Image: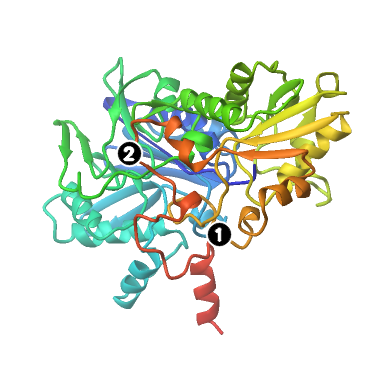
Amino acid sequence: MSIHEECGVFGVISEKPEDVARTVYYGLYALQHRGQESCGIVVNDDGVFSSRRDLGLVSEVFTSEVLSSFPKGTMAVGHNRYGTTGASNRSNCQPIVVNHQKGRMALAHNGNLSNAAELRSGLELTGAIFHTTSDTETIAYIVTKMRLYAASIEDAVVSAMGVLEGAYSLVLMSPQKLICARDPYGFRPLCYGRTEDGAYIVASESCALSAVGAEFIRDVEPGEVIIFSKDGIVSRREHCGEQRKHFCVFEYIYFARPDSVIDGVSVHAARIAAGRALAQEHPVEADIVIGAPDSGLNAALDYSMESGIPYEIGLIKNKYIGRTFIAPDGRTDQVRIKLSAVKEAVNGKRVVLIDDSIVRGTTSGRIVGLLREAGAAEVHMRVSAPPFLFPCYYGTDIDSSDNLIACHHTVEEIADMIGADSLGYLPVGRLRDLAPDCEYCSACFEGNYPTRIPSDTRKDRFEQRLAEAQK
C-alpha cells in the first residue's frame, strides 16, 4: 500500500479557560494516521490567537515545553496534514490564521477543492496575494471576502459554500465562535461530541473524541454548518440536500482508524465485510492467512473465518517509524525497515496475503519479496479494494492515471510483476457490502465523478504556475 493519508481536523470550545492546547494535542495524536507531514495548533485566549505549526509528527512538534508555552483559552483548533495540493513546507502547515477587517480567523481543512485553481485565479486578478500553495488558503480568502458583506462569520461560511466545489470538512475559529462545516456531498468525515465538563469537541473521526473523553453526539451532515458559542449550538442547513451524498468509500477501506464509526458505519465492521467478500470471490487453497499492517489486518481476520484457513501474524510493523522516515544514505529499502516477515509463521507455508490496495505495485512487490525470503512456498495476494483506475480529485493523493498499475496491466500481469502466485481484487459490485446504507463515492474505481473534473490536476499545480510566471 503506497497511497497517502488524508488530513485530520480537530476543534474544542469550553465554557471557561482551560488547557485547550493539550486537549487538541491528544486529539491530533489520535488522528495522526490521517497525516504525518505536518501539524499545528491555534489557541484562542479571549480573542488573542497563539499558534504553533511545523513539519513533523505531533509528538515531535509539540513537546512538553511547547505545550506549556500556550496560554489557557476557551477555544482551539488543530490539524494534521498530508498534502494532496501544495508542496511539503512550513508555509503550507495548518491551521491557517487570517487577520482581516472583521476580525481574526483560524481555519483547518480536510479534503480537496475541485475548483481551487479557478477560484485562486479569480482572487489573484482582484489583488489577492497568496502565501501558500494549498487550496486551504483559497477557502480562507473566500470566507474572508464573504465576511466583508455578511452579518456574521457563520453567514460568511454559508455564503462561501455556494462558491466552493469539491471536498471540504472545515473547523473554523473566530474570536467568539467555533464553526464546523461539511461539503454538500459529504466526501470527508466530520463529527462532534461533548466531554463531562461540558466542552464540545469537533473531529474528523470519532476515535479522536474517545481519546479526549468526549461522548459522540453525531456526525455533521453533508452541507451542514454548526456554530458553537457561549449562546449554545446552532445548525445551519441551507446547503443540506443540495447534492446526493458521495462519502469516500476508501475511508472505510484504508484512511480511517478501525475503532471509528463514520456516518453510522463501523470502520472495523466494513473491513471485516471486505475480508468476507474476498474469501467468497477469490478462494484459494492455502495454509495461513496474514494481513499487511495495519489496514489489512481486519480484512485478513474475516477472510480466515470465512475460508476456514488459519489466521497468523506473518508481518510485523516497526511502530517507531512514521511516514517521515528517511534513510541516511538514500538507498535503504524503506519497506524492509518498516516491515519484517515472521519466518516461523510463513516458512514452507502457502500464504494468503491481504492488503487494502495496490497503487503502483512497488510496495506490494517488496512485501511479497519479504515473504519469499522468509520461506513462503506460495503467496496469494488478495486486495480489499477494487483496482485503482482513475485519479481522485477529492483528497486522495492520486492525481494521475500514469502511475496506476491497474490502468496498464491485467490482473495476471500485475500478479507476475509483484511476484505473487495469484491476485484477487474486491469486485466493485461488492463495495456495497462494506457500507450497505451509505451513499458513497467510488470515482477512483469507476470514474463516475460527482463534480466537474479540474482542468489542472497536478499536485504541485500552484508551484508550477508560479515557476512558469517567473520565466
Does residue 149 lie above or below 374 as drawn?
Answer: below
Select label 1 or label 2 by which is in front: 1
Frontmost residue, 106 versus 223: 223
Quadrant of the frame with the N terminus: top right
Secondary structure of the residue carrying tag 2 is strand
Q: Is residue 184 left or right of residue 419?
A: left
Frontmost residue, 180 versus 449: 449
Frontmost residue, 285 versus 158: 285
> For the point 51% across and 30% down, which residue is it?
29
Q: Please, which residue is most extreme toward the left here?
A: 151
Q: Is residue 142 left or right of residue 358?
A: left
Alpha-carbon neighbours of circle 2 within 10 Å: few (<14), some, or many (≥20)?
A: many
Query: Can residue 192 be seen?
Result: yes
Indicate the position of residue 444 as horizontal and vertical percent values.
49, 51
Mark found first going from the N terminus, 1 or 2: 2
Which amino acid type is marked by label 1?
Ala
Indicate the position of residue 454 as horizontal and vertical percent values.
41, 66
Say which residue label 1 marks: 87
Which numbered marker is on residue 44? 2
Secondary structure of the residue carrying tag 1 is loop
Which amino acid type is marked by label 2?
Asn
> For the point 53% across and 69% down, which residue is it?
463
Query: Can residue 200 be seen?
Result: no
> For the point 64% across and 38% down, which residue is it?
424
